[in-house]
């Protein structure tokens, strides 16, 4: 390869992909930000910012933009994939012929594949014909705050701890702490399932319930996520960390979360389509609620909050009926 050490390409110029590219560039690495939309690339080049998703935040000199996928892959040692989960497998298929044994692959995408109910690392292993180090990035991080260089922290999860440490070091800066984990299953489940709980918290707040309700939802939601994650092979302690509890608290409690805002709209009486139009961006928790619910059924894991969110979003149950069902559950030991 002609690429130099510590060169990065970020695939996906949405808010989170752009923020991660900006963080890598700030940390001193030559970074290319790829978008499939040539017009968007032209705008970013002209403005030296991503006005569509992160307006008013200038790019670092180390950050360039491109619509040429082949060149982007060729010129980088590490590829960071940050596309919506529904486009994840398709994108892996596109880049597979371009990857060599010298490449490394990570992703900041959070979610699961609809239908197959596969975790993202499973998709990667199915689709890649090259055995290269892979890693998932997750944690309590809103794109706008990372882009503005506000303090934050993430976890890099990989079974290849050499790669995990290298990527964590590359992302690390004075305002951005990085940690490593071997539990890629737990990190991926935490990052996906928290969006479902954020919709639930938004619905509760939209209906005018108080902070007591939100705290109970977050706590019981964590319990649900932990049970599912452990059933799938994740480690219980992972869910007490940044990619579990940290991401859950963030997404359930702040209106920068699209999933929470979507839930707020539903709780205030908007129907599903009206709420989607109000957000006007991808709401990962809608599809994820169905997949998580099905995974719970497959693995005999009780997830009452997830079940009610699923029924509201996919079976026409009203938020009021969902809340009534949850409030009428019988007493049980808390740790069950």
Image (cartoon, helix red, strand yellow):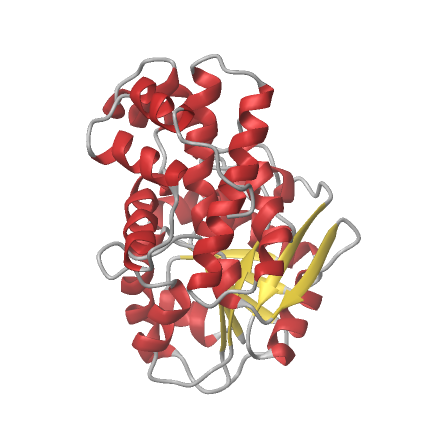
Give coordinates of residue 16: x percent, y percent.
51, 47
Q: Residue at x 28, y 58 (%)?
A: 298
Q: Nearer the viewer, residue 87 or 245?
A: 245
Which image quadrant is residue 216 in?
A: top right
- The answer to whether 139 appears left or right of 117 in the picture is right
Q: Residue at x 57, y 60 (%)?
A: 236
Q: Residue at x 51, y 53 (%)?
A: 226
Q: How many marks?
A: 0
Q: Residue at x 57, y 79 (%)?
A: 160
- The answer to whether 161 appears left or right of 263 in the picture is right
Q: Nearer the viewer, residue 36 or 275?
A: 275
- The answer to whether 135 appears left or right of 293 in the picture is right
Q: Residue furthest right?
A: 174
Give coordinates of residue 211: x percent, y percent.
59, 20
Give coordinates of residue 104: x percent, y percent.
51, 76
> Considering only vertical position in the picture, is 16 above or below 103?
above
Q: Decide if residue 10 is in sight here.
A: no
Which image quadrant is residue 321 in?
A: top left
> Considering only vertical position in the picture, is 82 above or below 5?
above
Give coordinates of residue 275: x percent, y percent.
32, 23
Q: Decide if residue 250 is in sight here.
A: yes
> Considering only vertical position in the picture, is 146 above or below 72?
above
């Amino acid at each position: 390869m002609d690429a130099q050490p510590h060169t990065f390409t970020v695939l996906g110029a949405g808010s989170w992909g752009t923020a991660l590219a900006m963080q890598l560039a700030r940390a001193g690495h030559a970074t290319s930000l790829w978008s499939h939309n040539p017009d968007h690339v032209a705008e970013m080049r002209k403005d030296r910012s991503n006005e569509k998703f992160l307006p008013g935040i200038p790019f670092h000199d180390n950050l360039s933009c491109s619509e040429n996928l082949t060149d982007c892959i060729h010129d980088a040692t590490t590829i960071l994939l940050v596309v919506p989960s529904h486009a994840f497998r398709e994108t892996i298929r596109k880049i597979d012929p371009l990857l060599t044994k010298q490449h490394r692959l990570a992703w900041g995408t959070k979610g699961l594949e609809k239908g197959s109910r596969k975790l993202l690392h499973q998709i990667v292993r199915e689709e890649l014909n090259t055995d290269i180090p892979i890693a998932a990035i997750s944690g309590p991080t809103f794109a706008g705050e990372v882009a503005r260089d506000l303090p934050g922290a993430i976890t890099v999860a990989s079974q290849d701890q050499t790669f995990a440490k290298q990527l964590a070091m590359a992302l690390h800066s004075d305002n951005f702490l990085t940690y490593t984990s071997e539990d890629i299953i737990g990190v991926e489940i935490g990052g996906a399932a928290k969006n479902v709980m954020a919709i639930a918290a938004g619905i509760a707040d939209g209906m005018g319930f108080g902070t007591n309700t939100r705290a109970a939802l977050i706590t019981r939601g964590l319990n649900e996520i932990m049970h599912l994650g452990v059933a799938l092979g994740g480690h219980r302690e992972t869910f007490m960390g940044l990619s579990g509890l940290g991401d859950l608290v963030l997404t359930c409690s702040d209106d920068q979360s699209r999933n929470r805002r979507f839930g707020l709209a539903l709780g205030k009486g908007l129907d599903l389509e009206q709420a989607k139009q109000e957000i006007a961006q991808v709401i990962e928790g809608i599809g994820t609620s169905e997949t998580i619910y099905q995974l719970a059924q497959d693995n005999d894991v009780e997830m009452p909050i997830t079940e009610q969110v699923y029924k509201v979003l996919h079976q026409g149950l009203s938020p009021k009926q969902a809340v009534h069902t949850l409030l009428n559950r019988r007493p049980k030991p808390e740790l069950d």
